[in-house]
Amino acid sequence: MLPTENRLRRREDFATAVRRGRRAGRPLLVVHLRSGSTGPHAPGESDSPTRAGFVVSKAVGGAVVRTRVKRRLRHLIRDRLPRLAPGSLVVVRALPGAGDADHAQLARDLDAALERLLGGGAR
């Protein structure tokens, strides 16, 4: 389970990450990352936690499938939060193929996208 302080909940925070952050696309998901040392709603506060949010549309599948994909992504991102700078905003958008993917495939795509966003991969 992703701790409460690491959850992205406000619409403005999702919009900030998507519009002002960097993006890396993979076959199963798209990751938006807005790096920052200060939180968008707490100016001057440098120790705000990294927060993550998820977008899983009906194109992925029915309610059961969408919930399963969100649970898997929450579990995967929880282990990867320490790699990100404090105050970062991450939005993971699942693409239609994510509903049929297993845990390992989602992990592989998430790792590849984060690697690219953190400067380890070429465009």
Image (cartoon, grey):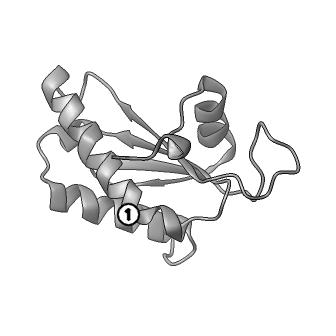
Q: Which residue is mark 1?
A: 79
Q: Position of residue 98 (x, y in %)?
A: 21, 43
Q: Residue furthest bottom?
A: 120
Q: Residue at x 55, y 44 (%)?
A: 5
Locate residue 66 relative to residue 93 in the image: left or right: left
Q: 43 above or below 36?
A: above
The one of 117 and 6 positioned closer to us in this rendering: 6
In this rendering, the count of numbered labels is 1
Q: Position of residue 30 (x, y in %)?
A: 41, 47
Q: Residue at x 66, y 60 (%)?
A: 86
Q: Position of residue 67 (x, y in %)?
A: 22, 31
Locate residue 56 relative to residue 63 in the image: left or right: right
Q: Is residue 52 visible?
A: yes
Amino acid type at image mark 1: Asp
The one of 44 and 89 positioned closer to us in this rendering: 44
Q: Secondary structure at mark 1?
A: helix
Q: Residue at x 19, y 42 (%)?
A: 97
Q: 105 above or below 13?
A: below
Q: Is residue 62 visible?
A: no
Q: Quadrant of residue 9?
A: top right
Q: 47 above or below 67?
A: below
Q: Residues within 10 Å of mark 1 (few under 14, many from 20)?
A: few
Locate residue 119 relative to residue 4 in the image: left or right: right
Q: Residue furthest right?
A: 44
Locate residue 78 relative to residue 84 in the image: left or right: left
